[in-house]
Image (spheres, grey):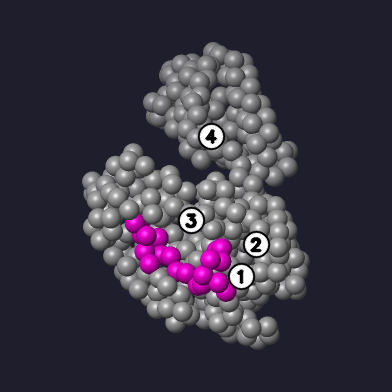
């Protein structure tokens, strides 16, 4: 497959397939497909039928990941993994995750039966969003050997454990270790919609992810003195919510001044929470992200200092605790460079960027070189039925992916790699 007309035709099929999978839903009239739900089985059946036509051998591993193998030139050939997730959030669109799986099938189709010096394993991860159990990445964690007894014991809101859900789906939790990446894996590629406005604002169809940002989540508690709103003069107050408010504006100001940093106070609660009472306690969360761990931790330290100084000036105390601390994950430099070449060959100007959200590639990167290609997201809208993808961008992604496979097939440096597992 070489012509842009052929890629455009394949892109039409990819989009139609994404929309078809969106119809497999737990909710009538909307898309919601959580981990090991009944519609996930329908989704597997549909996707398997496309994969089998291409001569792929299809299986479902013990955590419910759909895995389809397209053999390489020789039986002992190594393999690359291409994929993303098949689960969705409630009231989802048709493309988050799903596009990366369907596009991977399209790439195998684009080979027209040609075999490469590596096999291609298409993976449709069973769980990325964390909707059912409140724990994300169950699917990809199984591939790096991080589904343990503690995780298997987590329960959903109906009291069903991960272990029981696996059994109910007809799978065997004792076989989870078999889902781990084999030694012949050369790397993992994930196509995903950007889910943000950056590529659209630059007018570029495709981006290449350099790193998945690190993040901290903290909870701050400002403690002052609750008192009467009518009888307490302004200069004699110890107002916890006013202290928190001043700090929230400081968070926004510092984040705006720090390149590529994002910081969000997404939750605020004032107590006692009455119109005529000065707040004695205020709880506020902080979510801070950056591709550089140093930039992130330095900014966080400064925001803690500012919280303390604002509180002290107002006769308020502040305490904080860390809810999450996760370092940035770099994508593989060699693959990232190859993707840039492939994007250029497809006639587009590549844009190097960080991913502000976590993805399966972040988990796979623990064990194998991983890389991500972002597709422009119209309006930056995702996790909503209005989520979409431009037909031309999907065609460019297919063309880029096809060039990438051709480049990697010709690269001794790539073929000489072995899995770090
Ligand atoms: Zn996703």
CB atoms at circles 2 and 1 under 8 Å apart? yes
The numbered dot on residue 109 is none
Give the quadrant of the N terminus: bottom right
Task: Look at the numbered discs 1 and 3 and tell me whether their residues touch, using CB distance below 8 Å.
Answer: no
Return the residue at label 2.
415
Q: Is residue 189 above or below residue 249?
A: below
Magenta-drawn segment: 59-79
Q: Give the residue pinned by disc 1.
A: 117
Residue 310 lies in the magenta-colored region: no
Q: Spatial distance from mark 1 to mark 4, Cα to Cα?
A: 40 Å
Is 165 placed left or right of 401 in the picture?
Answer: left
Circle 3/circle 2 CB separation < 8 Å = no
Secondary structure found at label 1: loop
If you read the primary sequence from the N terminus, does the residue marked by circle 1 or circle 3 appear first? 1
Q: Earlier in the sequence, mark 2 or mark 4?
A: 4
Q: Is residue 165 visible?
A: yes
Q: Position of residue 85 (x, y in %)?
A: 46, 60
- The mark closer to the camera, 1 or 4, is 1
Observer-nearest residue: 303 or 143? 143
Counting residues from the N terminus, which is met first, the one under dot 3 or under dot 2?
3
Dot 3 corresponds to which residue?
A: 182
Q: Residues within 10 Å of mark 2 (few under 14, many from 20)?
A: some
| 351 relative to 189 in the view: left or right | right
The correct choice, above or below, for 221 with respect to 204 in the image is above
Q: Please tell me whether mark 2 sits on a helix, a strand or a loop.
A: helix
Q: Please report whichever mark, 3 or 4, sits nearer to the chain's N-terminal start.
A: 3
Q: Which residue is mark 4?
A: 325
- Our reading of the magenta stretch's main secondary structure is loop
């Amino acid at each position: 497959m070489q012509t842009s007309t052929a890629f455009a035709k394949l892109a039409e099929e990819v989009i139609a397939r994404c929309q078809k999978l969106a119809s497999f839903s737990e909710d009538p009239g909307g898309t919601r497909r959580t981990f090991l739900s009944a519609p996930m089985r329908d989704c597997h059946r549909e996707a398997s039928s496309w994969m089998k036509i291409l001569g792929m051998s299809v299986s479902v591993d013990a955590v419910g990941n759909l895995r389809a193998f397209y053999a390489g030139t020789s039986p002992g050939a190594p393999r690359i993994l291409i994929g993303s997730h098949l689960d969705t959030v409630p009231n989802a669109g048709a493309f988050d995750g799903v596009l990366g799986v369907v596009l991977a099938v399209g790439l195998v189709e684009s080979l027209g039966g040609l075999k490469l010096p590596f096999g291609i394993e298409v993976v449709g991860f069973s769980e990325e969003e964390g909707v059912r159990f409140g724990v994300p990445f169950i699917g990809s964690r199984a591939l790096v050997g991080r589904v343990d007894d503690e995780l298997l014991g987590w329960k959903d809101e109906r009291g069903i454990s991960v272990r029981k859900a696996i059994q109910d789906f007809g799978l065997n939790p004792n076989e989870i270790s078999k889902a781990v990446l084999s030694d012949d894996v050369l790397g993992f590629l994930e196509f995903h919609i950007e889910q943000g406005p950056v590529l659209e604002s630059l007018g570029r169809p495709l981006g290449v992810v350099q790193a998945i940002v690190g993040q901290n989540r903290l909870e701050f508690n400002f403690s002052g003195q609750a008192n009467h709103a009518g009888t307490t003069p302004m200069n004699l107050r110890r107002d916890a919510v006013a202290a928190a408010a001043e700090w929230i504006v400081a968070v926004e100001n510092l984040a705006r001044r720090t390149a590529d940093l994002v910081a969000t106070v997404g939750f605020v609660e004032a107590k006692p929470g009455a119109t005529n009472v000065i707040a004695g306690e205020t709880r506020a969360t902080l979510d801070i992200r950056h591709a550089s761990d140093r930039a992130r931790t330095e900014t966080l330290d400064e925001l803690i200092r500012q919280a303390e100084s604002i509180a002290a000036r107002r006769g308020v105390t502040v305490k904080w605790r860390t809810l999450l601390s996760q370092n940035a994950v770099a994508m593989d430099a060699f693959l990232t460079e190859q993707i840039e070449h492939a994007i250029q060959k497809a006639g587009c100007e590549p844009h190097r960027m960080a991913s502000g959200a976590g993805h399966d590639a972040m988990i796979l990167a623990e064990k194998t070189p991983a890389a991500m290609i972002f597709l422009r997201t119209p309006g930056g809208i995702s996790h909503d039925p209005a989520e979409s993808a431009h037909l031309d961008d999907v065609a460019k992604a297919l063309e880029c992916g096809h060039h990438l496979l051709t480049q990697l097939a010709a690269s001794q440096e790539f073929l000489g790699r072995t899995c770090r597992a």
